[in-house]
Amino acid sequence: SASDKGGWSSFMAKEISEEPEAVAKTILGRTHDGLVQLNELDPIGDEALRDIDRIVIIACGTAAYAGMLGKYAIEQWSRIPVDVELSHEFRYRDPILSDRTLVISISQSGETMDTLMAVKYVHDKSKAHLLSVCNTQGATIPRESHAVVYTHAGPEVAVASTKAFVAQVTALYLIGLHLAKVRGTLDDAAIRAAVDELQAVPDKLAEVIDVAQGQVGQLAHWMTDTQSVLFLGRHVGYPIAMEGALKLKELAYIHAEGFAAGELKHGPIALIEPGQVVFVIVPSPRDPSSLHPKVVSNIQEIRARGARVIAIAEKGDAAVLPFADEVIPIPLAGSLFEPLLAVVPLHIFGMELADAKGLDVDQPRNLAKSVTVE
Ligand code: G6P
């Protein structure tokens, strides 16, 4: 009913507005003296966590894209190799698991059958440690795991996941910082700096929602006849590109694909013809990895072939302005934290475009919130 939506036009609109809170509540009570303290990991124990030589993240859909972001952060901070696998692909090829493997499952509902079966497989066939990142207290997947870090996004009703996604990324970042502390791969000052960045995310999210709402809403209204939309991103922008594409498929029934920007020249650039809409997630010009000029040159390449470029870029990034048809600004943040901000305009875009096409934003055709069949 309308009252459950608290005056919002849809659950999805309400849930996007709750993204800042979802991050804040997921951090709450898990820091101490500026460092991360995840008592939920005690059942596995610091000794075992010091011995881990590999992490496998398993999930489906949006949760798998959160997992990809987790990979970048956990590898950078803890120096443990991380693989991300779709749950339904994972268990059908005799995966290599040992008592030094940490398997992290991610599921909003905690009931997704593909992920549950993968978790049960790990439980029954290996000595690997099983950690669940879940948004639903007491769900089946956390019950089948050795430890659980709950995301505190609150109940998510809309089929397309939004606030659970940012909460999942937050939980994975906390896990990454906990591992870095236990293993001594980051000093306390570096952990504190990362915790500060994470704690600054909710306010920045509120700012993005504020700025993007009108701008993205207008774009969506111009694009109701669009047949295909591409998304490009690099490094942590890559999972965001795929998440943006997934939202458009799910909600607006538009053919959409996300690509790693570096892959453009190896195929996808052939798709660019005049009028093709391309969203580009632009890394910060302050990013030490110097990916920014490379992505700007990708923009020039597709622009030269007639693409309509919508750039999601750091506020004040002057280099993209001459080449983009539209720039959606996001606040300054460290490179690992930018994707948490860049994803919001894409969540809003999917919702607004579906709405502009007169579609049911909360209940897209053929989909279920929680897929309890394999
Ligand atoms: C379904 C939903 C997606 C969700 C995926 C994983 O396919 O439509 O939005 O990302 O399941 O759900 P989970 O509850 O495991 O996070």
Image (cartoon, rainbow, N blue to C red):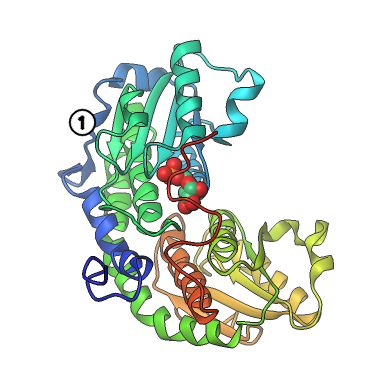
Q: Nearer the viewer, residue 118 or 319?
A: 118
Q: Position of residue 239 (x, y in %)?
A: 56, 54
- Image point (57%, 66%), residue name: 248
Tell me which corner region of the image, top left, top right, bottom left or bottom right, holds residue 229: bottom right
Q: Position of residue 104 (x, y in %)?
A: 43, 31
The one of 279 and 249 positioned closer to us in this rendering: 249
Asked whether residue 226 appears in the rendered view, the answer is yes
Q: Quadrant of the N terminus?
A: bottom left
What's under tag 1, amino acid-wise? Asn
Residue sitting at 46 percent across and 85 percent down?
215
For disc 1, the marked residue is 39
Percent coordinates x, y for residue 268 in the rendering = 78, 62
Residue 227 location (% of width, % of height): 70, 74
Position of the C terminus, as image quadrant, is top right
In the picture provided, is 89 more to the left or to the right than 286?
right
Task: Answer with the quarter of the image where residue 97 lies.
Answer: top right
On screen, residue 95 versus residue 49, left or right, reads: right
**Label 1 SS:** helix
In the image, taking residue 180 as reference, residue 28 lies left or right, namely: left
Asked if residue 73 shows in the view, the reply is no
